[in-house]
Amino acid sequence: MKTTKLCPVQKNEKYVVTIEDLTYEGFGVAKVEGYPIFIENALPGEEVETLVLKVGKQFAFGKVLQFLEKSEHRVDDENMQWIRTGIAPLHHLAYPEQLKFKQSQVENVFTRIAKMPEVSVLPTIGMEEPRAYRNKAQIPVRSLEGKLETGFFRKNSHDLVPLEDYYIQDKEIDRAITVVREIMRKFQVKAYNEQENTGNLRHIIVRRGHYTHQMMIVLVTRTPKLFQYEKMVKEIVASLPEVTSIIQNIHPERTNVILGKEEKVLYGEPYITDTLFGKVYHISAQSFYQVNTSQTEKLYQTAIEFAKLTPEDVVIDAYCGIGTIGLSLAEKVKQVYGVEMAKSAIRDAKLNAMANEIENISFETGKAEYVMKKWQEEAISVDVVFVDPPRKGLDPHFIEATVEMKPKKLIYISCNPATLARDAKILAEKGYKLEKVQPVDMFPQTAHVESVTLFTRKK
């Protein structure tokens, strides 16, 4: 007769536990009779009294009631709002330890998923000042106690936590959000109510050029009507002299997706500009542009160094976005081909090539795997492929298309160690050797880590 194993902890009960590890999301891990409890704001080596909040078959969640022994790596000025909203879930961990944690994250997935414990994972490249680095903010707007409010959602909920200091955002962006919020209040703009699908202002988005300081304000509204917008725009520009673009994005659908398809330019240009490696980029409201500019330069520099490019190389920049990688390396090679699904991104990429007077690069719209097959049919021979996919990693068809083109090197920029490890295993089976992995901390104070991996084709 099969017996059911009883859970060793109970909901709403208190336990004294020792934290053994951190999860990839930054929760402390404690175990009671081998059963894991994930605990927010707890670090390895700490002894805490925890209250169990939720119990499942495989694990439980708890919260710290009191610290009985603290880690020597704890930063004591933690702000629970930054932890509970997920804005900065690791800011209570000393920064050098954050970098070690991210290196171990990458090492662990290569051992566990790729079955490659021998992989060389280099120490994480960090920032000198790992705060106030984000050049973009997407801030939800809701009504609290009858008042239009800005802040961030509590994790795993749509409960808005009012905030003015977001810790990891450019401080001028924080100030701009507050200024715009006050102007919206003055003109009695109604905040969006997602339960009833009423109200109008859904999000305030701010982008700021790291080097140019040009600022874009995007007002995401449920309806096209934005009463007295001319007066609001005038006040925003008067209060925020850096603003060179104000966009209204119209998003009537009942969805968690932040941006809608229709846009109106209310002031200035439909884009701002910024620079990477001295090259100018047009950044529109919906453009993908890395949010940490200084670390992006380190990330791309690492990728270019791994490739050891020559003037005779032909390069593909897959998932090219607005062309930042391809344009950064174009002067070092014979030809670059960029491919991206988003038409707006390719439009921006072509503008960026013209703005920088770079002629040995071309861009095409479409799925990378299909466009690459077309290039192969056109007898285009490629030496190096750079790829920077979304979190889901590489499509199997993309891997097949890449292998068929037989590039000597594949430079894989990843924002998800787990899918990188999965893809590395497949690439190894198809004749590509993993040489080295360099983690780069693009998102300090969070559990996220990007990395650059070099694959070479086996002879």
Image (spheres, helix red, strand yellow):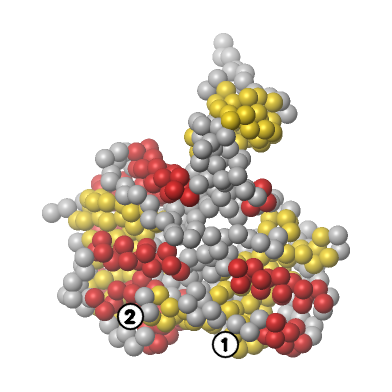
Nearer to us in this view, 5 or 442: 442
Q: Where is residue 116 in the image (x, y as percent from the top left)?
A: 29, 40
Circle 2 SS class:
strand
Q: Tag on residue 256?
A: none
- What is the crowding at mark 2: few (fewer than 14 residues within 10 Å), some, or many (at least 20)? some
Q: Tag on residue 269?
A: 1
Q: Which quadrant: the N terminus? A: top right
Circle 1 SS class:
loop
Q: What residue type is labelled 1?
A: Glu
The residue most toward the right is 146
Task: Work out whether residue 114 can be spotted.
Answer: yes
Residue in view at x 21 percent, y 65 percent:
308
Which residue was labeled with disc 2? 362
Residue in view at x 69 percent, y 63 percent:
164
Nearer to us in this view, 172 or 451: 172
Nearer to us in this view, 359 or 22: 22
Residue in view at x 36 percent, y 85 percent:
356
Q: Position of residue 173 (x, y in %)?
A: 61, 71
Q: In the rendered structure, which disc, 1 or 2, sits on the residue that comes first in sequence?
A: 1
Look at the picture and state if 282 lies above or below 142: below
Look at the picture and state if 351 lies above or below 365: below
Q: How far apart are marks 1 and 2 (CA)?
A: 25 Å
Residue in view at x 30 percent, y 60 percent:
411
Q: Where is residue 15 in the image (x, y as percent from the top left)?
A: 65, 24
